[in-house]
Every structure is written in structure tokens, then in C-alpha cells.
Image (cartoon, helix red, strand yellow):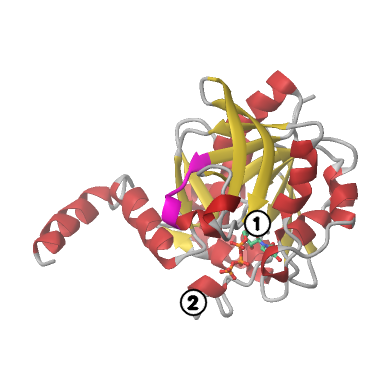
């Protein structure tokens, strides 16, 4: 079965990027000239996904506006004969069927995903965290979808994280199957002691889940940080039917923290056709002053 639906949870409070995120969702923070969430929607579309549900919250209406029609702006671009930008702007509302639902209470990633139950129905679906921009030759979620096609089990997008950081992430028990594809049989969210760490492999921003996750989420109680953790629900699948994991290719930028935002802007900025050369020149001069 092909994966045609994606859920993008974007209802978090973004407290690590305050005060910038007090009234501006972190998912709308720009990476050069596009908001983070646009990269994620484009990645989904490039992987063949046709239907996207974005989970929002109070104060996140600008995300909806970004993927809506903008009559005044479009008329002004038309009048100014800025046809290329007009096409860019128009494309935003026709890339995919994009719908929105509010999480109402910010009770964690697992709770956010549970809001997608009626959108998803009875088919496997992709989850793409709204603050995780991944850039590479092949869409990261497409790499997971390929592995879903191979084994028919839930798939986790994984990478190794630094030992000193593993307590902030989910830690996975994995076993290599072939190339960059692993079997995952257990996981723990935010391990607090070295003994609790299963490996330095962590889920980073992407997964493909079976619809059974919704029934599990309904009975998942708050875990780390008092939030309903998606990892806790996925653990039940990993320890019973098992899951697969793929160490995806592509560079991942965490738009949920200040350093990640700056890294994304610098690295994608130097490759940008319009400003890349000027930014490189500027950076070369600037580093001499450090
Ligand atoms: P994070 O844990 O990174 O988001 O969730 P957060 O809660 O906004 O982070 P901080 O700690 O306060 O800075 C990863 C993704 O899940 C979404 C976030 O918007 C982000 O895209 N999320 C998180 C929800 O949709 N709902 C939630 O209740 C929590």
C-alpha cells in the first residue's frame, strides 16, 4: 500500500525559541526565504504524498494563511508583472490537499498525532514534525516510505546523536538488517540514566505509522515531561509486531532551537542561487573577525 497521507504536528509552544515564538509559530520561522513548514510540505509532496493534515493551535493561524489564497498580494504581483513570484505564491495553495485541525490543549506530540485519527482512517500514514527541516537529494520521508514498501511495518527515521544529548531524545534498540535499514524492537523517550539508554540512535522528525497507533494513543498515559509521548505509543508496536528504522540521507536542521535555526539559514543560505555568493563572501570576511 502506498502512503498518501501525512500529518504535520505544529501545535507545540516552542518554548526553546522564546521570545521569538511568543506570537510567531516556530514552524513559520524562515530558512532564507521560506518558512520551515514549507520545506516540510514540499518534502512530502516530492515523496508522492497528496493529503496533508497540519495540527495547529491558538495563535498559529499564520500557518493556514501561508497555504491559502492571498488575493491582494496576487493582484499586486500581477499588476507589477512579477509573474515568477506570482507562480511561486499561487503554487503554495495547490501543492497538496492541505487541511488543518487544532490540538486545543498542548499535551504532547502523541496527543497531537491522536487528533489525526479521522483524517487518517484505516491506512498507514507519515508523521513529519513541523520543526524538523531535512534537506537532501531524496526526500527523507520518501526513503521511509520505500522501507515501508519493503517490510510493511512502521518505519522510523533515525540518526545517531551525541552521547551527551541522548537524554533529550528517544533512544532506540536497533539491529542492522541491510544498508541503512534496521529492525527496531524497543525504545525509550528521554532516558534519564546511562543504563536506560538503548543506543545513540534516535527518532529524528519522521516516521511512517500504522493506523493501530490511534487505539494505542487513546490509552497512553502522560510520560516524560508530563506529556503524552508518541514514543511511548510506538514502543508498544516496536515490542510486539516490531518496527523498522532507516538512517535517512539528508541534513537535518532542528528549527526548535536557536542554534539549529541559525545553522539552517547559513547552510541553505550559502547554496541559495540569489544570495549564496554574497553570503559566502560576507562569511569569509566575518570569520576573520572572530
Ligand atoms: P517539540 O517537543 O520539539 O515542540 O515537538 P515544543 O513542545 O514546541 O518544544 P519546546 O520544548 O516548547 O521548545 C516536536 C513537534 O511536535 C509539535 C511541535 O509543534 C513540533 O513541531 N507538538 C509538540 C505538537 O504539535 N503538540 C504538542 O503538544 C507538542
Does residue 260 appear anywhere in the picture?
Answer: yes
Give percent across and percent down for residue 253.
45, 52
User: Pointer 2: residues within 10 angstroms few (<14), some, or many (20+)?
Assistant: some
Ligand 1 quadrant in view: bottom right
Nearer the observer: mark 2 or 1; the answer is 2
Does residue 89 appear anywhere in the picture?
Answer: no
Question: What's the distance in space between the residues labelled 2 and 1, CA to CA?
Answer: 22 Å
In the picture, which quadrant includes the C terminus?
Answer: bottom left
Q: Which residues are magenta?
A: 159-164
User: Pointer 1: residues within 10 angstroms few (<14), some, or many (20+)?
Assistant: many
Q: Is residue 131 left or right of residue 209?
A: left
Q: Give the residue at x 60% y 52%.
A: 196
Give percent across and percent down for residue 113.
77, 54
Q: Which mark is residue 20?
A: 2
> Taking 147 as reference, is 285 above or below it?
below
The residue identified by callout 1 is 67
Between 36 and 126, the residue placed more toward the observer is 126
* Label 1 element class: loop
Between 227 and 71, the residue placed more toward the observer is 227
Q: Is residue 142 left or right of residue 277?
A: right
- Label 2 vs 1, first from the N-terminus: 2
Whether residue 200 appears in magenta in the rendering, the answer is no
Whether residue 161 appears in magenta in the rendering, the answer is yes
Amino acid at each position: 500500500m502506498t502512503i498518501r497521507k501525512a500529518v504535520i504536528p505544529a501545535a507545540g509552544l516552542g518554548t526553546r525559541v522564546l521570545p521569538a515564538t511568543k506570537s510567531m509559530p516556530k514552524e513559520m520561522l524562515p530558512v532564507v526565504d521560506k518558512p520551515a513548514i514549507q520545506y516540510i510540505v514540499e518534502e512530502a509532496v516530492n515523496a508522492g504524498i497528496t493529503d496533508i493534515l497540519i495540527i495547529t493551535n491558538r495563535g498559529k493561524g499564520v500557518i493556514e494563511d501561508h497555504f491559502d489564497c492571498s488575493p491582494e498580494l496576487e493582484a499586486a504581483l500581477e499588476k507589477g508583472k512579477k509573474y515568477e513570484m506570482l507562480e511561486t505564491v499561487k503554487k503554495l495553495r495547490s501543492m497538496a490537499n492541505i487541511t488543518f485541525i487544532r490540538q486545543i490543549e498542548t499535551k504532547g506530540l502523541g496527543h497531537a498525532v491522536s487528533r489525526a485519527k479521522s483524517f487518517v482512517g484505516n491506512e498507514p500514514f507519515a508523521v513529519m514534525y513541523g520543526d524538523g527541516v531535512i534537506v537532501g537529494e531524496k526526500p527523507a520521508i520518501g526513503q521511509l516510505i520505500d522501507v515501508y514498501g519493503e517490510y510493511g511495518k512502521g518505519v522510523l527515521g533515525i540518526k545517531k546523536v551525541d552521547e551527551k544529548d541522548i537524554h533529550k531524545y528517544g533512544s532506540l534498540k536497533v539491529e542492522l538488517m541491510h544498508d541503512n535499514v534496521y529492525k527496531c524492537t524497543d525504545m525509550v523517550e528521554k532516558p534519564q540514566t546511562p543504563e536506560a539508554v538503548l543506543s545513540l540512535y534516535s527518532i529524528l522528525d519522521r516516521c511512517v505509522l500504522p493506523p493501530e497507533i490511534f487505539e494505542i494513543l487513546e490509552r497512553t498515559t502522560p510520560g516524560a515531561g508530563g506529556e503524552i509521548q508518541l514514543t511511548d505509543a510506538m514502543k508498544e508496536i516496536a515490542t510486539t509486531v516490531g518496527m523498522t528504522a532507516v538512517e535517512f540521507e539528508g541534513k537535518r536542521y532542528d528549527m526548535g532551537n536557536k542554534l539549529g535555526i541559525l545553522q539552517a539559514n547559513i547552510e541553505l543560505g550559502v547554496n541559495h542561487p540569489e544570495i549564496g555568493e554574497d553570503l559566502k563572501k560576507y562569511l569569509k570576511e566575518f570569520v576573520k573577525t572572530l
